[in-house]
Every structure is written in structure tokens, then in C-alpha cells.
Image (spheres, grey):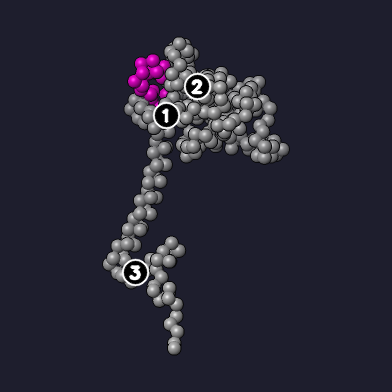
Amino acid sequence: MRARSKTHSSQPQQATAAKTSDPRSIAPPIVHSNPVLDRTYRLMHRGDYQAAMGILQSAGRDPSIRNALGVCLLRLGRPADAVAVFRQFVLAPGSVSERSDLSKHYKRNFALALLMNGSPSGALDVLRETRQPDHPAAIRIRDTVKQWEKTLSWLRRLDWKLNRIEPSNCQVPIDFEPGELEDSGLEVHQGQESELVDDERKVRRRKHAKREDAGTGHQEQQRQRNVNPTFRATGPATEAGNRTSDDVAGPTLSV
């Protein structure tokens, strides 16, 4: 990721606080094998982010610990501090490139922190580098940017579309609880799966169903050919395969 330093250092005068609902109404607390994170996640589930931060700040530098700390800051409406936390472990030391060995959800959280800190261009740059455009969390971030675009004046919108320059003191409101504590494919909740896991599985099922439908259609055509040698499948994809030897040879010339 080659994001502009100006983009990453954008500091709006007043950060846009997240509009969060009661987290207990969204999903049960995440269960984690690490006792520190397990305790922290339970505190966060109750909305006690200050207490969770008190544990995390002295719990070490592991990426999962730093990620949870960054999520706490996002949910407390402190995106500038969250950007600083995510930058420390998401970016390679002494570089503006993202580390390739990290889980994608850390990078999505970094993108969201940039967005909440008034840098939608930086957020989209980071999000693009995750190479998971169909992930529900990535879609949600892009949709938030699109909604923000609609609030711009025509001149500001033109500058954004052409030059990717956001207005000074840019604020992008969000209407969901920010931050992923665990990769959505690995989250384990008490009693039910997370909303993101369910959404991602639905996307995968639809793609799998399309592949199965395509394969079934091909198998049926092959079966028809085996049963009836004169069977001619319809459609442009099979037109070449339906041509007879007379079609290829052309009309017979009389001598």
C-alpha cells in the first residue's frame, strides 16, 4: 500500500463518533482461547471500553492485543488515537507498505480508522490492498464512503472524484459499530454465529450455486448427446459445437 503521508496524517478538528447500538443486541460475546482477550471481549461486549483498554495497554504488543485496543478507541470515538495504534503494527517498520503476514481484518480496521479520522482516500487505499472486495466489512466501508459522497457539494464532489481530495476537516459519519475483533471467518460466539460470518457464507453459497448450475447444464447437454447423437444444444456458447461436417465443408460443387 502506497498511501500518501498527508492522507494518513489527516487530523480533523472533531472526530466523528460512531453511532453504536447496544452491542449485546448484535451478537453474544466472542469466546477466545487467550484469557486476556476473552476477559477483554466480555468487557467490550458490556460497553466497558475504558476497563478493556486498561487491560490491553499492559498486555503486550501482539497484533491481536493491539487490534483490540484500536477497536476500543474507535468505539470510544477516538479515531486519531486508533490510527496511531493500527499504523504501528499494520505497516512495515520504516515503511508505508502494509505487512503481508497480518490478517486482513486488522487492515480493514486500519482503513476504518482512517475513514473515521477524516481520510476516506486513505481508507480506500488500505482497503484496496486487502484484495477482498466482496467481504461484508469491506462492502460496508465502501458503502459508507458512497453515502458520504452524496453529502458533498457538486464542486467538492468533482474534486473528490477526479483528484481524490477530501474537504478540510472532513467528517464521515458511520451508522454501525466500528471494528472487527476477530477475522469474521474465525469468530466463535456464545450461542450463535456473527452477522458477518453469516453474510460471508451466503455470498459463498451463491457463488457455489452458480458454479453448480453451470456444471449441471453442461452435464445435461452431454447426456443428451450420448442419448441422441442428433441433439443440438442452443445458445451462442454451443453454436460452434453444433455445426455439422456439411456446415464446415460447405456446399458440394457439381463437376
Residue at far bottom of view:
255
Span of residues in magenta: 24-42
Give the amino acid at mark 1: Asp
Camera-side mark, 2 or 3? 2
Residue carrying label 1: 183
Residue at far front of view:
255
* Residue 169 image offset from top left, x and y in percent: 67, 25
Residue name at image x 39 percent, y 42 percent: 204
Q: For numbered disc 1, what is the local secondary structure? A: loop
Q: Residues within 10 Å of mark 1 (few under 14, many from 20)?
A: few
Counting residues from the start of the chain, the first of labels 2 and 1 encountered is: 2
Q: For marks 1 and 3, give the CA distance.
A: 50 Å
Residue name at image x 44 percent, y 28 percent: 101
26 in the magenta segment: yes
Which disc number belongs to residue 231? 3
Residue name at image x 49 percent, y 34 percent: 130
* Residue 165 image offset from top left, x and y in percent: 67, 33
Question: The N terminus is located in which quarter?
Answer: top right
Q: Quick check: 215 left or right of 61? A: left
Q: For numbered disc 2, what is the local secondary structure? A: helix
Residue carrying label 2: 89
Between 194 and 34, which is closer to the camera in this rendering? 34
Please say whether residue 207 is visible from this viewpoint: yes
Q: Residue 174's quadrant in the figure?
A: top right
Counting residues from the start of the chain, the first of labels 2 and 3 encountered is: 2
Give the amino acid at mark 3: Phe
Give the amino acid at mark 2: Phe
Is 57 rendered above or below residue 250? above
Q: Quick check: 160 left or right of 136? A: right
Between 96 and 169, which is closer to the camera in this rendering? 96
Counting residues from the start of the chain, the first of labels 1 and 3 encountered is: 1
